[in-house]
């Protein structure tokens, strides 16, 4: 699915008589793969995802899905049928009394058989390292923060949306759950979904994204491949952001006189770049 934002501007009501501009003439397009959205707190990342999901309507500009205007008619119906949004605060998206009902809700609403709903719910929870047998009967509100986030992601993954939007999916996850989450994001993109991930976690974005955009005060300030941006620690710093840990280590090593080629994004790539530098 291709989603295009064309000059999208959105302001919230602030203090009485004041407007808070969250997005300012944002133009960008995503189609397939995983796109990361970075930016400091308050830069507009969550607002961008909610506009893409059709939850918020822009004050100006247009959102197009596969070339159709998403503000009404066939475009809006296509978007509603295709989108899965994981909110920053998972408890904001829960409304069912048990985990089983929560994860199965969207599937049941689509008329899928109870047996198939259980199978898909089990699979989605397992992708996030959780067991339907163990947690199915619990209230989603009674879970730990990390479990809630994983249930929220599973309930969206179960729907296999062709547009998957995730707001801070790795926040508060332990290393194993974080890895499972990143693998699930990658798998969704490999199965054909267009995935957009908003996050402060540069290493998570470096691990899963094909390209990245950065927002500053509601404007797009950077738009490029993951390696061009997260692999360039100096550029990211100039924009008040952090590059991938491997890129920051590479630039520190270069300053210390160690030859490191390329723009490594992971520890493994950094190690290979150091070894290559030694043997050349
Ligand atoms: N419901 C709201 N009412 C008023 N202002 C809002 C509302 N939601 C967001 N804002 C403002 O809009 C701007 C963008 O907020 P947004 O939540 O999109 O940023 P963000 O980049 O996701 O931030 P964070 O990294 O903290 O999650 C901020 O100035 C924020 O204070």
Image (cartoon, rainbow, N blue to C red):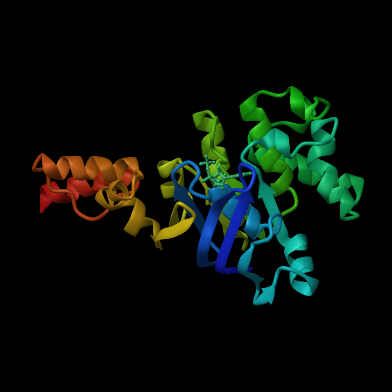
* Horizontal side of residue 71 vs 218, given as left or right: right
**Rendered location of residue 198, percent (x, y):** 53, 48
Q: Up-down: is 131 above or below 182?
A: above
Of all residues, the one furthest to the bottom in this rendering is 67
Front residue of 252/107: it is 252
Q: Is residue 31 visible?
A: no
Residue located at (55% from left, 30% from top):
172
Residue located at (25% from left, 49% from top):
234
- Which corner quadrant of the figure contains ligand 1? top right
**Rendered location of residue 168, percent (x, y):** 55, 41
Q: Up-down: is 256 above or below 166?
A: above
Front residue of 265/163: it is 163
Front residue of 238/78: it is 238
**Rendered location of residue 40, percent (x, y):** 44, 44
**Rendered location of residue 209, percent (x, y):** 47, 54
* Horizontal side of residue 241 vs 135, given as left or right: left
Q: Quadrant of the N terminus?
A: bottom right
Q: Quadrant of the C terminus?
A: bottom left
Residue located at (48% from left, 41% from top):
41
* Horizontal side of residue 152 vs 201, given as left or right: right
Q: Is residue 177 visible?
A: yes
């Amino acid at each position: 699915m291709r989603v295009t934002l064309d000059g999208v501007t959105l302001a919230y009501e602030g203090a009485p008589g004041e407007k808070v501009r969250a997005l300012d003439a944002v133009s960008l397009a995503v189609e397939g793969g995983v796109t990361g959205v970075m930016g400091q707190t308050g830069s507009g990342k969550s607002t961008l995802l909610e506009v893409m999901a059709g939850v918020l309507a822009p004050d100006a500009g247009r959102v197009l899905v596969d070339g159709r205007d998403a503000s009404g008619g066939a475009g809006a119906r296509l978007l509603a049928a295709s989108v899965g949004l994981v909110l920053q605060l998972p408890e904001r998206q829960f409304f069912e009394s048990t985990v089983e009902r929560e994860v199965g809700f969207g599937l049941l609403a689509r008329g899928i058989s109870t047996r198939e709903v259980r199978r898909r719910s089990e699979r989605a929870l397992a992708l996030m390292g959780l067991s339907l047998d163990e947690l199915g009967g619990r209230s989603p509100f009674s879970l730990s923060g990390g479990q809630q986030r994983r249930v929220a992601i599973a309930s969206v993954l179960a729907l296999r949306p062709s547009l998957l939007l995730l707001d801070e999916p790795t926040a508060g996850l332990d290393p194993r759950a974080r890895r499972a989450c990143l693998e699930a994001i990658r798998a969704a993109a490999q199965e054909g979904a267009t995935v957009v991930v908003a996050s402060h976690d540069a290493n998570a974005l470096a691990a899963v994204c094909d390209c990245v955009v950065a927002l500053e005060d509601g404007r797009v300030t950077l738009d490029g491949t993951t390696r061009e941006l997260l692999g360039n620690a100096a550029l990211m710093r100039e924009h008040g952001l952090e590059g991938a840990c491997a890129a920051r280590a590479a630039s520190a090593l270069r300053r210390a006189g160690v030859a490191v080629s390329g723009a490594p994004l992971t520890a493994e790539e950094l190690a290979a770049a150091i070894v290559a530098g030694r043997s050349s």
